[in-house]
Amino acid sequence: MAVAKVVALLLLVALVLTTGVFSDEEPTTTPGSASEIQLEQLHAKIHALESQVEEKRREVKEREESVTEKEKLLKERQDKVSSLETELSSLREKGSSESVQ
């Protein structure tokens, strides 16, 4: 009987302790507590980093557009140089054939 009382007492203590440990209550934080302030600081930092990412994204987009424009201009100039070289070659052939006659 004494053993039964000890076991019952141990079960009661264990039940009380596990109820407190596994309760679903969130820890209470007082307004302005250190964890709340830290959370606000982290949110502010996340917002600042998101702003920086967006700014960098815009810069990259502008650079890509600039590169695309420069590639287009380069292609146009290469085509023009090729055309002028062809014309020059044609004129040289014409000039040499006229000098032969």
Image: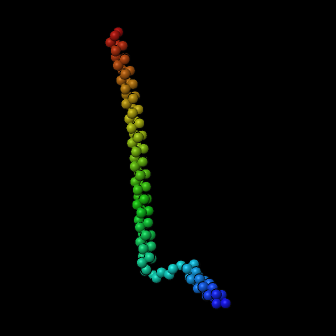
Query: Of all residues shown, which one is farthest toward the right?
Result: 1
Establish if 80 lies above or below 96.
Answer: below
Q: Residue sitting at 42 percent across and 63 percent down?
A: 49
Q: Is residue 87 left or right of 27 when viewed as pictured? A: left
If the image is split into quadrants, where does the C terminus sit?
Answer: top left
The residue at 39%/38% (across/down) is 74
State which quadrant residue 43 falls in: bottom left
Horizontal side of residue 26 vs 64, given as left or right: right
Quarter of the figure with the N terminus: bottom right
Vertical order, 41 against 3 (above or below): above
Residue shown at 36% from the left, 23% from the top: 88
Would residue 12 be visible to someone looking at this image?
Answer: no
Q: Residue furthest top?
A: 101
Q: Quadrant of residue 48?
A: bottom left
17 on left or right of 46 = right
Tell me the residue at 42%/78% (across/down). Answer: 34
Residue 67 x/y as whole percent: 40, 45
Q: How is the image coloured?
A: rainbow
Q: Is residue 91 visible?
A: yes
* Residue 86 % position (x, y): 39, 25
Find residue 90 and report its image quarter.
top left
Residue at the left extreme?
Answer: 99
59 to 20, vertically: above or below: above
Foreground of the two, 88 or 66:
66
| Residue 99 x/y as whole percent | 32, 12
Q: Nearer the viewer, residue 64 or 47?
A: 47
